[in-house]
C-alpha cells in the first residue's frame, strides 16, 4: 500500500518535473503586405508566448495596439478601421504541435502547429508549419504563414483593395526561457 | 487490494485532470500576465483631420509627414440660379503642414480672401490617456498677413497693420469610439481694426465635435461664439458649420456647409458676415493628403 502511494506520488512529481514550460514576454510577431502600389509592414515585439514541451501545447497572446507601423497614419487606420482594437484589443492563439522535439538535445526540429487563432473577435483553426529549436536551454519557436483578412471579418474597401495584399504574410518568432 | 486500486485510480485521475486543464490554462496565464503588465493607453484618432471644418483640431500631422490641405468655399447658396447657387464664385486656401516631431507641427497657408498668407504651428501639450488624462490639449498659433489692398494703393498700410495673431487652446476628448468633442477658447489680436470702437483683442469660444457614422465617415459640426461689443463697426455673426468627413487611405475629404467665407481664425471667428437664416450658406470642401517622408526600414 505504502509503496503504491509512494509510486503514485513519484509519478506525479516526475510528471510535474517533466512538464517543462518555456515562456517569453517579448516574442515577435510581424505581418507584411506587398503590392505594386504599397508595402505595408507592422511589427509587435511584445508577444507573450508559452510552450509546454511535455504536452506539446502552446499559447500566444498580444495587444493588437502593440503592432507598430513605420507610417503613423497606417497604424491609426489599422487600429481604427480594420482591426478595431478598441473593441477587440487582443490577438490570441492556443493549440498544440506535432513533431518530436527533445528539449534535452540541442537542434532544430520541424513541427506542425495546429490550433485556434482569435483575431478581430473571430476564431479560426489554423494548421501551419514551423520549427522549434533547442539551444542554450531555450526553446526558439518560429513560423511563417499566410492569413486572409476576410477570414477574420476584416473588410477592405474597394478603394484601397489594390494597396492591400489578398493574403498577408505573418511571421512569428519566440525565444522562450524555462519558467 | 480494493483500497490500493482506489488510491491508484485517484492518483491517475489527479494526473489526467492536471494535464487536460493545461490548454486554456496556458493562455489564461499569458493573458493575466499581459493585463498585469499593460500600460495606460494614449488615445488615438480623436479626429480624422487636422481641422474640424474651419477650426483646427487637437490632431496634427505625425512626425515626418507632410500634409497638403485644400480648403475651398463656393459663393452663397442664396445667390440664386444666375450664380449657379454660388458655384460661380469661390474662395480657396492652400496649406502645407509638416510634423517636425510627434508633438509639434508647423504650417504655412495662403487664402484667396484678402490675399492672406499665414504661418502657424501646433503644439500638442497633453495627450488623452485611458484612465488617467481625460483630454488632449494642443496649442495652435497662427500669424496672418493680409496683402490686399496693394501697398502701392494704400502706402500707409504697413506690414504691421496687415498682421493679426490667433491663439487657440484646443481641448479635445474622445468620449467614445464614435463621439469626440472639442472646446477651443481663442484670442485674436488685430494690429489694426476698422474703428477705435472695435477691440484689438477679440475673444471667441469654439465648440465642435464629430460623430462617426461608419468606420471611415463622420459628421462634424462646429459653432464659434463671438461675444458682443468686440467687433462693432460691421455686422458679424457667430460661425456655424456642418460637415461630412470621408476618409480613404492618405486622404480625408470633407464636404462642408458654413456661413463663414474665410478659413483662418481672424476671418471665420471675427469676420463672419453671413447668416444661416438669410441663406448666406457657403458650400465647400476640405481635402487633405498626407505624404510620408520616413525612410523605409
Image (cartoon, coloured by chain):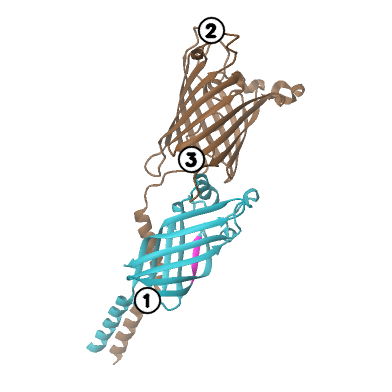
The residue beneath circle 3 is B64
SS at mark 3 in the image: loop
- In this rendering, the label closer to the viewer, 1 or 3: 3
SS at mark 2 in the image: loop
Q: Position of residue B52 (x, y in %)?
A: 54, 33
The residue beneath circle 1 is A54
Query: Contact (CB < 8 A) between labels 1 and 3?
Result: no
Question: Given the image, what chain letter belongs to the residue carrying mark 3?
Answer: B
Q: Which chain is brown?
A: B
Label 3 Cα neighbours within 10 Å, binned few <14 / some 14-19 / many ≥20: some
Instruction: Quadrant for the N terminus of chain B, please.
Output: bottom left
Q: Which chain is cyan?
A: A
- To the question of a shared chain for discs 1 and 3, the answer is no
Q: Position of residue B186 (x, y in %)?
A: 46, 24
From the viewer's side, name the closer residue of B16 and B65. B65
Question: Given the image, what chain letter belongs to the residue carrying mark 2?
Answer: B
Name which of mark 3 and mark 2 comes first in the sequence: 3
Above or below B62: residue B189: above
Magenta residues span A113-118
Q: Residue B96 lies in what quarter of the image?
A: top right
The residue beneath circle 2 is B156
- A163 lies left or right of B204: right
- To the question of a shared chain for discs 3 and 2, the answer is yes
> Magenta span has B153?
no
Amino acid at each position: 500500500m505504502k509503496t503504491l502511494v509512494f509510486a503514485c506520488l513519484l509519478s506525479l512529481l516526475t510528471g510535474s518535473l517533466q512538464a517543462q514550460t518555456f515562456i517569453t514576454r517579448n516574442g515577435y510577431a510581424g505581418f507584411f503586405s506587398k503590392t505594386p502600389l504599397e508595402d505595408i509592414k507592422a511589427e509587435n515585439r511584445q508577444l507573450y508566448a508559452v510552450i509546454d514541451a511535455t504536452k506539446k501545447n502552446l499559447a500566444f497572446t498580444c495587444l493588437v495596439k502593440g503592432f507598430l507601423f513605420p507610417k503613423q497614419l497606417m497604424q491609426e487606420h489599422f487600429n481604427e478601421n480594420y482591426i478595431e482594437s478598441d473593441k477587440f484589443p487582443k490577438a490570441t492563439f492556443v493549440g498544440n504541435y506535432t513533431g518530436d522535439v527533445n528539449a534535452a538535445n540541442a537542434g532544430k526540429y520541424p513541427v506542425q502547429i495546429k490550433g485556434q487563432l482569435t483575431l478581430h473577435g473571430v476564431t479560426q483553426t489554423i494548421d501551419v508549419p514551423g520549427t522549434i529549436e533547442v539551444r542554450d536551454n531555450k526553446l526558439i519557436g518560429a513560423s511563417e504563414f499566410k492569413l486572409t483578412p476576410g477570414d477574420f471579418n476584416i473588410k477592405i474597401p474597394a478603394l484601397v483593395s489594390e494597396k492591400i495584399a489578398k493574403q498577408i504574410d505573418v511571421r512569428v518568432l519566440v525565444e522562450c526561457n524555462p519558467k | 487490494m480494493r483500497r490500493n486500486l482506489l488510491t491508484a485510480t485517484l492518483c491517475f485521475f489527479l494526473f489526467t485532470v492536471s494535464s487536460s486543464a493545461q490548454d486554456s490554462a496556458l493562455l489564461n496565464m499569458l493573458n493575466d500576465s499581459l493585463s498585469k503588465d499593460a500600460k495606460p493607453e494614449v488615445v488615438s484618432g480623436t479626429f480624422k483631420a487636422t481641422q474640424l471644418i474651419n477650426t483646427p483640431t487637437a490632431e496634427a500631422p505625425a512626425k515626418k509627414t507632410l500634409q497638403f490641405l485644400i480648403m475651398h468655399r463656393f459663393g452663397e447658396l442664396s445667390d440664386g440660379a444666375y450664380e449657379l447657387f454660388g458655384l460661380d464664385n469661390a474662395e480657396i486656401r492652400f496649406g502645407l503642414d509638416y510634423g517636425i516631431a510627434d508633438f509639434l507641427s508647423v504650417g504655412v497657408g495662403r487664402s484667396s480672401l484678402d490675399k492672406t498668407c499665414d504661418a502657424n504651428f501646433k503644439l500638442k501639450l497633453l495627450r488623452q490617456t485611458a484612465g488617467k488624462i481625460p483630454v488632449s490639449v494642443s496649442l495652435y498659433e497662427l500669424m496672418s498677413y493680409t496683402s490686399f489692398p496693394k501697398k502701392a494703393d494704400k502706402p500707409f498700410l504697413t506690414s504691421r497693420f496687415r498682421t493679426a495673431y490667433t491663439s487657440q487652446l484646443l481641448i479635445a476628448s474622445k468620449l467614445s469610439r464614435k463621439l469626440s468633442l472639442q472646446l477651443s477658447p481663442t484670442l485674436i489680436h488685430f494690429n489694426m481694426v476698422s474703428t477705435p470702437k472695435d477691440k484689438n483683442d477679440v475673444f471667441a469660444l469654439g465648440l465642435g465635435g464629430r460623430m462617426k457614422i461608419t468606420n471611415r465617415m463622420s459628421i462634424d459640426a462646429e459653432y464659434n461664439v463671438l461675444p458682443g461689443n468686440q467687433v462693432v463697426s460691421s455686422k458679424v455673426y457667430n460661425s456655424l458649420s456642418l460637415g461630412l468627413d470621408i476618409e480613404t487611405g492618405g486622404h480625408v475629404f470633407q464636404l462642408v456647409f458654413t456661413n463663414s467665407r474665410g478659413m483662418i481664425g481672424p476671418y471665420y471667428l471675427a469676420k463672419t458676415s453671413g447668416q444661416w437664416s438669410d441663406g448666406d450658406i457657403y458650400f465647400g470642401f476640405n481635402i487633405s493628403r498626407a505624404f510620408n517622408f520616413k525612410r523605409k526600414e
